[in-house]
Every structure is written in structure tokens, then in C-alpha cells.
Image (tube, rainbow, N blue to C red):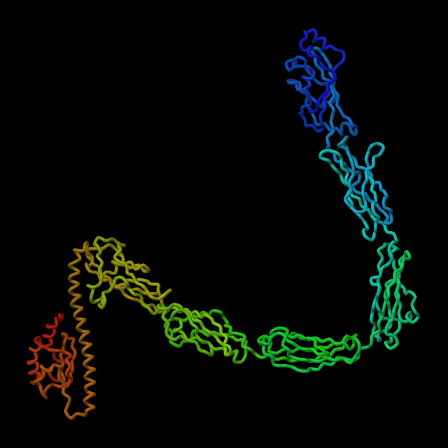
């Protein structure tokens, strides 16, 4: 709130006078005047001043005195509680007072009891809330380029609604090299701007200027307004025409036709309008020249009018002028040279040619030497050569019109085995004449390329159990060289452990063959490295990896891991060695009896196993899981079921064809192991007896085979000797048959197994080896029977069964063989 001034001061004694004096003070004839000062644009409710306090009223008196304002327009309001004067609306000084330097609002403050009137003046102070503004946004000026520096041009003035220091203070002009702005003050005090030319203008350098004029006031912060100055520089004929060249040189053949264009001269004028219109013509020129040439006044084109003669005149000099519309003139010199006709072509001679050239020849190697001549003179006799064709060759000029053909880069026979180029010689005549000759350069091979395999890595798939020598695959490598340098041979360079012995490679074709039959279960894949090398010197080689994948075949039957079978025994004849399972008779359906465990060495579908129960005393009692192999009860065990159950399950794979194995499972139906022991003991006795019988049969058959082979050998031996005496066969026991002499039977048969199993043994008389040893107590009786020729002792010895007391039975008892009849 601005400060206030009071013109009258109340004495301090008035505050303590009696009520009578106070009444006299209130009734004074001359009213007091209060002054306040506020800035414009104050918001509604802003405090103007403590009106009640300045009137000498205390807050307690306000209700009785009833302070109020009297005015036509209420810009202010007084608070009834504290007597302060407040703004009732926002005031704009420019709207209320315009351009007046001072602005105030006057009104009366009324109080009652007793009634009194006070005059109040509120001064409205200016705020810099208006920026200077030009009446036009742009000013168009046209100034001739010949205007002298110091010339002034009126630009007008800008308006600013503020007053005092907030009003317009000056003008500023954008920095430039030609103009400045000056501030002038009119009689009424307003400030306007004048444009002052500081340096002469040049339309040819700048045809127009665009500058920014700024008006600035004196506020804090200052405000500004801008306008655009568009200055067009008008032309004056202050520039003479200028030729593009001061001297033109042109050459014409002597056989040029009349009407041919010699050249076009061109001049330019920096002026505009008629000052820039140019006409061309010849200056002082001899009549002989004017007969030969003519110039077009508008375009400046010089044309030949008559034929030229090189022998008559070899050159002409023409003076051409250019004149603009203001009379200014420019000159240039045109020199015309007459050229001789070129009627001889160059001649090319090949002095030497080196072919073939090895492909490893370094760059710059000379491969040919040529000589070029032209009988013409001047430019017609000046010859230059070039090579035509895509080849790594270049032409190097030498002395005396000679040229060397050299290699520009390294040669590569694999890309091009020969290069054909053309040596072209051209003279500098017009038109140029030329001649050419062809050169053929052959490139010889060098072993600079290693064999390259068609693939960096090969894969082959071979089914197992293949035949040895079967083809696996064929590798191929190419060598870009030729001859021995490009001849490729193959060999094995190495591979994974054990990979090399599996395959071999044919040196010429690159075919790989299997060395042996593959077994998927032993080796599923292996890799070998095949090396390809050429026949060059030095030898170059490369390698490729061949991975051979062995494919599985169904060549392995499933193998039963459980129930296990005792080693060397038949599970059907020796159940005592096989495991058994005890199933309580109280078992319900689904009771797990055992699990058949089997594996297959194959892979994939060949190793997928399925289980099936093929033999069981009670088919409805047990079942086996198709894929799990679990043997479970299919129903509850009953008392009628046999105590011993022998189950046979078959395990089958999914190969083509399918292979299978069987598993035998012995099940005892008993509530406990003690109850199952008697059943197991009976089974062991029967199993032992069956095992003995099997052993006897095997031994008997093996002995029979051995004696048969031995007998055949002895017969052949005696027939070779051609002995007169008939062969006599005796047993190998010399002690037993020492008394038989020449009456011994031809052969003898002895049965070692009870009927109906028997076998015969035949021994030669010269044999001293004992195959069987018979017991001595039965030897004498046997000898007597043989000598007496009793039935069964001759050639028909195998027809009658032996007696119970025969030696065969004694031998069986002594050998502890328990046979069952």
C-alpha cells in the first residue's frame, strides 16, 4: 500500500478533551481530505488504507458512527468491523485516465452521530503492463542505389499506453552494414524513428534488405514491440557489360561448311531492365575477316560465312564488342585457328610378345612391346594409345613412340586362362583417326589352389550288420588348377578313436567303403577325416569331416534280468536254482507277485518291450502288465488253486521282425515261508534227478561222436597199409581183453544209459588209449560171453537189452548216476 499524506494534524490534546470539546471538533466547518496511492491492476479485496484510524475513529465507535462511502461508482468498500478501505474491483489506469499523466479517484466518507463528511482521494499509479506497438507490422521502402550516405527516411512512431518512465523511450534497429536508426521527439513530446543511410548501397550486391525495428519502453523489466523493414534497392546504370572471357580461342577444320557455328560469345550486365540489355557486334575489323565471319547481335553467336583454306590463312583474330542500353561497352578478342585435315591413321607394330606367362608373375611384368607412328604433322601426328578389353594389363609409354604392355595385377589362370586385348592408337586430329591390333596372352598354370570339398562336413547313415566292403558314401573335391596340379587323390587323415579301421577310401573316386560289419550296440557313430591332395609341387591339400551314423537293426533279443537263471542250468529242468515267490492264499485281486525285468540292447522301437503271460497252470489267476512287466493276481487266491505255480512270460520287442525271450517264474501259494518249505524240498529232489538224466544224455552223445570219428580214422589207416589180416577191434582196456586173442568180436557195444537210451562204442585193437574204464569184477564174465558167442555179443549187439547185473549197470552205480527207469 502506497504511503498517504495528510494536510491537517490533530493535536494530541484533542484525544483527552472533555466531550464538549469533542463535539466542537466534529462540527468544524472545513472538512479533512485523505489521500491514498495504489498501483493499478490490484486484485479485488486488496487493502487500500486504514480509513477509520485515519479519521480518528476507534473500532468501538464504528457501530455507532456508521462509517460509509458516498460515490457514483463504487470502486472501493469499507469494512464495518475494522474500518479499513478495500478494493471492490480491479482498476485499469489506461482505461480510466487514458494518456493523462496523473490519475485518481475521489469520493466522500460519511460518519453519523454527529454527521460529518470527509473527502478521500485515491491516486492510481501506472504499472508497465503495456508494450510499445507499431501501427503497421511492416514498412516498405524503395531506395535508389545511387542515394548518398546521410539520407534520412521517416519510419513513424510506436504507441505505448503507459505513462512516465513506463512509456516509449527509444528505437533499436537490427545490426546491418548500411542503415542506422535515430530517435526524434515531436513538439507534443512523442518519439518517432528515422532511418539513416550510413553507407552507399549496391543493387548488384544486395537487391533488398529485411531489417527488424524494435521499440522499447522504460519499464522494469522493459517491454518492446517490433516491425519489419523491407528495403528494395532500385537500379542505376552503373555497370558496364562483362564478357565471360576476355580472350576466346577456337579451332576450325579447313573443311568446315559455311553456316557452321564458330562459337558463342557471352557477356553479362549486373544492372536491370534496359540497362542490362546487351547487343553484340564487330569492332574495327578488316573486310577480309567480315567476309568470312558474322556475329548475331542478340545471341552473340559467330557463324562461318565462307569456306576456309588452311594454306591461305591459318588463323583469324576477331574483335567483338558488347553494348548495353545505357551506352556502356565491353570488348573481347576471338582467335580462330584453322586446322589441317587429318588424312593418315597411326601405324602399330608389335616388336615382341611373351606368351604364355605364368600366373604367379609379379605385377609390372612386361609381356609385349609395341611401336606406334603417324606420318601426319601437328596434332594429326600426335598419337596416344590405350588397351581395349577387360584384362589385368596396362600400357606404359616409352621413348620414341614405343609402349610396353605390362601386368597391372596378379594373374589368375583359374579365372581366365588367356587374355585378349586390343591395342588402339588414336591421333589428335579432328576427327581422330585410329588403328588397332589384337594381342592374345596365354596364362600358364601354377599350383596355387588347394582342393575344395563340395561340403565342409559329410553325414552318412549305414544300417548295422552291413556287409564288409559295402559303400558308405562318396566325397568329392574340386581343384581349380589344371593338369597334375588339379588331379585330386583321397586318403584318410584321421578321425575319432576307432573310426579309421571302420572305413576305407578309394584314392581316385573318393568313395568310402565299410571295412567290416558295424554294430550299433558297440559303436553308434564315428567320424573320419578325409584328406584331398593334388599332384602339384608343392602339394596342396584340404580336409573334410565325415560323420557316419550307424542305424539300429533288431538283432538283439530281449534279455531277462529278473527272474535270474542259474548259470549253466536250464530253467525248465532246474527250478531249484530259480527264484521263487511266495503268495499268501489270502491275497486279493491285484496283489503284486513279482516284476519281470528285461532289457534290449537295441534302440528305438527295437528296444520297446511288451510282456505277455503265455503259460500258467491257472490262466485266470495271474496277469502281467503289458508294458510294466508286473505280475499280479487277476483274482483272489482260492483253496482249490495248486500250491506250486509255474508261470512263463514272453518278452517281445517291437522290431521287424520282432524278437522275444521267456522268463519262468515259480510261485508258491502259502501263508508263510515255513509252510512253503516242504513244497520246495520235493521240487529240489525232482530237479536234481532231472539234472542227472540230462547230464548222462549229454556225455553219452559226446562220447558216441568221438568214437565214431576215431573209428573212421582207424579204418582209413588200415586200408592204406593194405594189411592181409582183417582188422580186429578191441576195447581200450588191455587188462580186460588180454585173453581174447584172435577170437575177439569185431566190435562191442555197451550202453551207459537205461533203456531206451543207449549208444555204441567201437575201439580198434591197436588202440592203447582208454576212453572208458570198466570194472574188473565184471571183466571175466564179459570175456566168457564174448568167446562163447552168446546172443548180444556179436554184430547184433544192440538188439537185446542188457541184464540187470551187467557191467553197464555196475558202472553206473559206481559212478553215482541215479537213473530213473
Q: Identify whether 666 is placed above or below 734.
A: above
Snapshot quadrant of residue 363: bottom right
Mark count: 0
Whether residue 726 is visible: yes
In this rendering, would 71 be left or right of 670? right
Of 661 and 522, nearer the camera is 522
Residue at point 90%, 56% (across, down): 326
The front one of 259 and 791 is 259
Measured as percent of width and height from the top left, residue 444 is found at 58, 79
Within the image, what quadrant is residue 745 found in? Answer: bottom left
Instruction: Using the image as rendered, state which of residue 747 and residue 601 is in the foreground.
Output: 601
Rendered-image quadrant of the C terminus:
bottom left
Measured as percent of width and height from the top left, residue 288 is found at: 92, 71
For the point 22% across and 68% down, the residue is 568
Residue 71 visible (yes or no): no
Can you say whether 136 is above or below 375 in the image?
Answer: above
Q: Position of residue 46 (x, y in %)?
A: 67, 25
Which residue, as the protein is rendered here, is positioned at the far front? 399
Left or right side of 245 for 411:
left
Q: Quadrant of the N terminus?
A: top right
Establish if 360 lies above or below 301.
below
Q: Position of residue 327 (x, y in %)?
A: 91, 57
The residue shown at (69%, 17%) is 54
Amino acid at each position: 500500500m502506497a504511503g498517504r499524506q495528510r494536510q491537517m494534524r490533530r493535536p494530541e490534546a484533542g484525544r483527552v478533551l472533555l466531550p464538549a470539546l469533542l463535539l466542537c471538533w466534529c462540527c468544524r466547518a472545513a472538512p479533512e481530505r485523505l489521500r491514498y496511492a495504489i498501483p493499478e491492476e490490484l486484485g479485488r479485496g486488496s487493502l487500500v488504507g486504514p480509513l477509520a484510524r485515519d479519521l480518528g475513529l476507534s473500532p468501538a465507535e464504528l457501530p455507532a458512527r456508521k462509517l460509509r462511502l458516498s460515490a457514483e461508482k463504487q470502486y472501493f468498500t469499507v469494512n464495518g468491523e475494522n474500518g479499513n478501505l478495500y478494493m471492490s474491483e480491479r482498476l485499469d489506469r489506461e482505461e480510466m485516465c487514458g494518456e493523462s499523466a496523473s490519475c485518481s479517484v475521489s469520493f466522500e466518507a460519511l460518519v453519523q452521530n454527529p454527521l460529518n463528511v470527509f473527502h478521500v482521494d485515491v491516486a492510481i499509479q501506472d504499472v508497465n503492463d503495456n508494450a510499445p506497438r507499431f501501427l503497421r507490422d511492416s514498412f516498405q521502402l524503395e531506395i535508389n542505389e545511387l542515394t548518398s550516405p546521410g539520407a534520412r527516411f521517416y519510419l513513424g512512431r510506436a504507441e505505448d499506453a503507459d505513462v512516465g518512465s513506463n512509456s516509449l523511450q527509444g528505437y533499436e534497429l537490427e545490426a546491418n552494414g548500411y542503415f542506422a536508426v535515430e530517435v526524434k521527439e515531436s513538439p507534443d513530446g512523442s518519439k518517432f524513428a528515422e532511418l539513416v543511410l550510413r553507407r552507399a548501397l549496391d543493387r548488384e550486391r544486395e537487391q533488398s534488405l529485411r531489417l527488424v525495428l524494435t521499440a522499447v519502453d522504460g519499464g522494469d523489466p522493459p517491454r518492446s514491440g517490433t516491425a519489419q523493414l523491407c528495403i528494395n534497392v532500385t537500379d542505376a546504370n552503373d555497370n558496364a557489360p562483362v564478357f565471360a572471357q576476355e580472350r576466346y580461342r577456337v579451332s576450325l577444320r579447313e573443311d568446315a561448311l559455311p553456316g557452321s557455328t564458330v562459337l558463342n560469345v557471352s557477356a553479362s550486365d549486373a544492372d536491370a531492365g534496359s540497362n542490362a540489355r546487351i547487343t553484340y557486334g564487330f569492332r574495327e575489323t578488316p573486310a577480309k575477316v567480315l567476309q568470312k565471319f558474322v556475329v548475331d547481335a542478340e545471341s552473340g553467336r559467330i557463324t562461318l560465312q565462307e569456306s576456309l583454306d588452311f594454306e591461305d590463312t591459318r588463323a583469324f583474330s576477331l574483335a567483338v564488342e558488347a553494348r548495353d542500353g545505357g551506352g556502356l561497352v565491353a570488348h573481347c578478342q576471338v582467335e580462330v585457328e584453322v586446322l589441317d585435315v587429318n588424312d593418315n591413321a597411326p601405324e602399330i607394330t608389335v616388336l615382341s610378345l611373351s606368351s604364355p606367362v605364368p600366373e604367379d608373375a609379379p605385377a609390372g611384368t612386361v609381356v609385349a612391346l609395341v611401336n606406334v607412328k603417324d606420318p601426319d604433322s601437328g596434332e594429326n601426328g600426335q598419337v596416344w594409345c590405350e588397351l581395349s578389353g577387360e584384362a589385368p594389363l596396362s600400357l606404359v609409354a616409352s621413348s620414341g613412340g614405343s609402349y610396353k604392355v605390362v601386368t597391372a595385377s596378379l594373374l589368375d589362370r583359374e579365372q581366365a586362362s588367356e587374355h585378349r586385348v586390343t591395342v588402339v592408337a588414336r591421333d589428335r586430329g579432328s576427327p581422330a583417326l585410329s588403328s588397332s591390333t589384337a594381342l592374345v596372352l596365354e596364362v600358364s598354370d601354377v599350383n596355387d589352389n588347394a582342393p575344395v570339398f563340395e561340403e565342409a562336413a559329410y553325414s552318412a547313415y549305414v544300417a548295422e550288420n552291413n556287409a564288409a566292403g559295402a559303400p558308405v558314401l562318396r566325397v568329392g573335391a574340386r581343384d581349380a588348377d589344371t593338369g597334375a596340379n588339379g588331379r585330386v587323390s583321397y586318403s584318410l587323415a584321421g578321425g575319432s578313436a576307432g573310426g579309421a579301421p571302420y572305413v576305407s577310401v578309394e584314392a581316385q573316386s573318393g568313395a568310402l567303403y565299410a571295412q567290416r560289419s558295424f554294430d550299433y550296440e558297440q559303436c553308434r557313430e564315428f567320424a573320419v577325416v578325409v584328406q584331398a591332395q593334388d599332384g602339384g609341387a608343392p602339394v596342396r591339400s584340404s580336409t573334410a569331416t565325415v560323420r557316419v551314423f550307424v542305424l539300429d537293426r533288431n538283432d538283439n533279443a530281449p534279455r531277462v534280468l529278473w527272474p535270474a537263471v542259474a548259470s549253466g542250468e536250464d530253467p525248465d529242468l532246474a527250478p531249484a536254482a530259480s527264484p521263487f515267490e511266495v503268495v499268501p492264499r489270502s491275497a486279493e485281486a491285484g496283489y503284486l507277485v513279482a516284476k519281470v525285468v528285461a532289457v534290449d540292447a537295441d534302440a528305438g522301437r527295437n528296444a520297446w518291450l511288451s510282456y505277455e503271460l503265455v503259460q500258467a497252470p491257472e490262466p485266470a489267476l495271474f496277469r502281467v502288465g503289458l508294458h510294466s512287466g508286473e505280475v499280479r493276481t487277476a483274482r483272489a487266491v482260492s483253496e482249490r488253486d495248486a500250491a506250486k505255480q509255474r508261470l512263463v512270460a514272453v518278452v517281445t520287442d517291437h522290431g521287424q521282425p520282432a524278437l522275444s525271450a521267456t522268463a519262468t517264474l515259480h510261485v508258491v501259494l502259502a501263508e508263510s515261508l515255513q509252510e512253503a518249505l516242504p513244497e520246495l524240498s520235493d521240487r529240489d529232489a525232482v530237479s536234481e534227478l532231472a539234472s542227472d538224466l540230462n547230464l548222462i544224455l549229454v556225455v553219452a552223445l559226446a562220447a558216441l561222436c568221438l568214437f565214431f570219428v576215431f573209428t573212421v580214422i582207424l579204418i582209413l589207416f588200415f586200408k592204406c597199409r593194405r594189411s592181409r589180416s582183417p582188422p580186429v577191434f578191441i576195447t581200450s582196456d588191455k587188462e580186460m581183453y588180454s585173453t581174447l586173442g584172435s577170437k575177439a568180436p569185431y566190435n562191442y557195444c555197451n550202453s551207459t544209459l537205461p533203456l531206451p537210451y543207449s549208444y555204441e562204442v567201437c575201439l580198434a585193437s591197436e588202440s592203447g588209449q582208454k576212453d572208458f574204464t570198466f570194472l574188473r569184477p565184471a571183466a571175466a564174465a564179459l570175456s566168457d560171453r564174448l568167446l562163447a558167442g552168446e546172443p548180444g555179443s556179436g554184430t547184433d549187439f544192440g538188439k537185446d537189452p542188457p541184464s540187470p547185473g551187467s557191467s553197464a549197470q555196475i558202472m553206473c552205480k559206481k559212478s553215482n548216476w541215479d537213473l530213473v527207469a
